Amino acid sequence: MARFRNTPVLELRELAVVYKSRGQPPLQAVKKVSLSVRRGRSLGIVGESGCGKTSLARAITGIIRAHSGSLLFEGGDVSRLDTHGRRLYRRKVQMIFQDASGSLNPRMTARQTLAEVFTVHRLCSQDQIGQSVEELLERVALPLKLLDAYPREMSGGQCQRVSIARCLALQPELIIADEPVSALDVSVQARILNLLRVLQLELHLTMIMISHDLAVVRHVCDEVAVMHNGELVESGPTVSVLERPHHSYTRKLLAAVPDVNRALNARSGQL
Ligand SMILES: Nc1ncnc2c1ncn2[C@@H]1O[C@H](COP(=O)(O)OP(=O)(O)OP(=O)(O)O)[C@@H](O)[C@H]1O
Ligand SMILES: [Mg+2]
């Protein structure tokens, strides 16, 4: 742990993502993005639809390959990891998605979904799984009576709690949440965001939160990075970027929220 104290958990150096489809010119979805996130901090990534937020997240998790640039995790180059290191990396970096119910297996109850993680990754002995599953459910504040519920029997917020629990089972270092509340009602959004914030602080997790909603980022994130057309145009502490933006695109993004400070304060109040 001491070795990593001053090293960012994640560091991107000029990371680029290019999609190549037959008969189409290559699409540069992420263009030389450099950023770093320190342990226990939360970074918001904002920007309009199609600017490359999800592509960046997928490149970090390894779902897609970066075209160029480097990705350092706890100081080590991820592209140089051996098979064991890669497996560990995939465990330490977890993603939470917008469509929580879609990311759960419809044929599995909450108990089965969570037990499967413990079994597949051999995280505890078979006779401890039941207790570990119950502890996880408590962590995400879900009533035990939902253990035997299927995704279709749960609300969007409850499904998101199960996916958060599934991700916590793996004891991640870094959680990347891609629009985790945008499909939920505002009152449910607030509770899920508060849960993520509490978990992040209690477990000293590092978090990247992708969101269209500036109020969400303001509520949850210590720092914010603004993306535009695949590029990172501005980053810094959330309060200073949102209150004293330097880049014209950040100002445009803020101007899209009418009476920005009042609107952000009102939304943050709800959140
Ligand atoms: N699998 C893919 N193949 C080809 N192009 C893709 C693929 N996925 C995304 N793109 C394109 O890459 C660009 C960035 O998309 P991406 O999904 O990363 O944006 P985003 O910022 O997450 O958008 P949103 O806010 O709508 O989720 C867009 O032009 C998109 O059409
Ligand atoms: Mg996206």
Image (tube, rainbow, N blue to C red):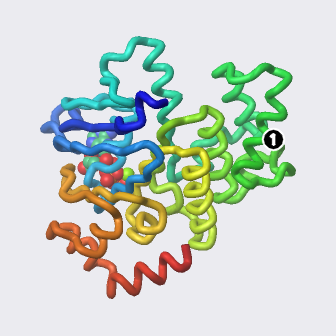
**Figure label count:** 1
**In the rendered view, does 132 fall on the left or right side of 176?**
right
Residue 199: x and y, percent?
60, 51
Left or right position of 140 against 259: right
Q: Is residue 60 above or below residue 223?
A: above
Position of 113 relative to 261 (above/below): above
Q: Is mark 1 within 8 Å of ligand 2?
A: no
Quadrant housing residue 172: top right
Residue at 28% across, 59% down: 236
Q: Is residue 192 left or right of residue 58?
A: right
Q: The residue under label 1 is which amino acid type?
A: Glu
Q: Position of residue 195 (x, y in %)?
A: 62, 58
Quadrant of the rendering where the C terminus is positioned: bottom right
Can residue 85 be seen at all in this image of the molecule? yes
Pointer 1: residues within 10 angstroms few (<14), some, or many (20+)? some
From the viewer's perspective, tell me whether residue 177 is left or right of residue 106.
Answer: left
Residue 227 point in image, percent of width and height: 25, 56
* Residue 28 seen in the current view: no
Point 60% across, 34% down: residue: 171
Q: Secondary structure at mark 1?
A: helix
Q: Residue at the location (30% across, 24% down)?
A: 77
Is residue 143 positioned above or below 58 on the image? below
Q: Residue at x 41, y 32 (%)?
A: 4
Name the one closer to the observer, 11 or 144: 11
Establish if 29 lies above or below 218: above
Tell me residue 80's x, y (percent). Answer: 31, 17
- Residue at which label 1 appears: 134
